[in-house]
Image (cartoon, grey):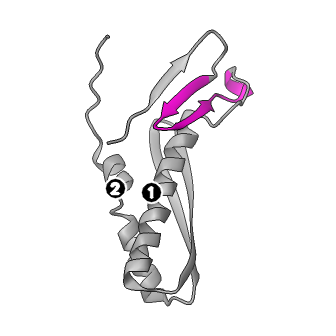
């Protein structure tokens, strides 16, 4: 299943990420003391949800042989006081009707990352 390794040195707050064959940098913006050398952690969270959403919907449209030409998910992490939520807006392009788009929106509510976030999950931390 998925695995990532995060490493940070003394430079605020550039973090090296290795996942599979991929390497990239995560950082905070200047407003939090970083240099914006890569996406911030919550940007990755919304990116993961967006990617899972559009991949799943593309797979579904292909399986149904629906003429979907593009799927976009605009995903925002919102914090209002002590409350948090994610707002997701789908745009489905192609010659599909309202009923098909509604069905795809229903499917979006059951993508793997959506279900993980909605259900919460246990995180076990230990020292090496």
Label ID, residue 21? none
79 or 118: which is nearer to us? 118
Residue, disc 1: 52
Q: CA distance from mark 1 to mark 2?
A: 7 Å
- Tell me if residue 67 comes above or below residue 112 in the rendering: below
Q: Quadrant of the N terminus?
A: top left
> In the shown orientation, is residue 38 left or right of residue 73?
right
Task: Identify the residue at image location x=51%, y=56%.
Answer: 50
What's the residue at 58%, 42% (across, down)? 43
Q: Quadrant of residue 11?
A: top right
Question: Which structural element holds mark 1?
Answer: helix
Highlighted magenta segment, given as a residue range: 15-32
Q: Are marks 1 and 2 in contact (CB under 8 Å)?
A: yes
Is residue 45 within the magenta segment? Answer: no
Q: Position of residue 21 (x, y in %)?
A: 50, 38
Q: Position of residue 3 (x, y in %)?
A: 38, 35
Placement of the C terminus among the 4 image quadrants: top left
**Secondary element at tag 2:** helix
């Amino acid at each position: 299943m998925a695995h990532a390794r995060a490493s940070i040195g003394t430079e605020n707050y550039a973090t090296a990420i290795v996942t599979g064959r991929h390497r990239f940098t995560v950082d905070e913006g200047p407003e939090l003391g970083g240099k914006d050398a890569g996406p911030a952690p919550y940007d990755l969270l919304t990116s993961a949800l967006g990617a899972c959403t559009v991949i799943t919907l593309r797979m579904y449209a292909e399986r149904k042989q629906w003429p979907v030409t593009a799927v976009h998910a605009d995903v925002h992490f919102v914090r209002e006081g002590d409350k948090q939520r994610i707002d997701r807006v789908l745009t489905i392009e192609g010659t599909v009707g309202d009923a098909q788009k509604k069905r795809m929106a229903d499917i979006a509510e059951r993508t793997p990352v959506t279900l993980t976030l909605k259900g919460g999950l246990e995180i076990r931390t230990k020292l090496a």
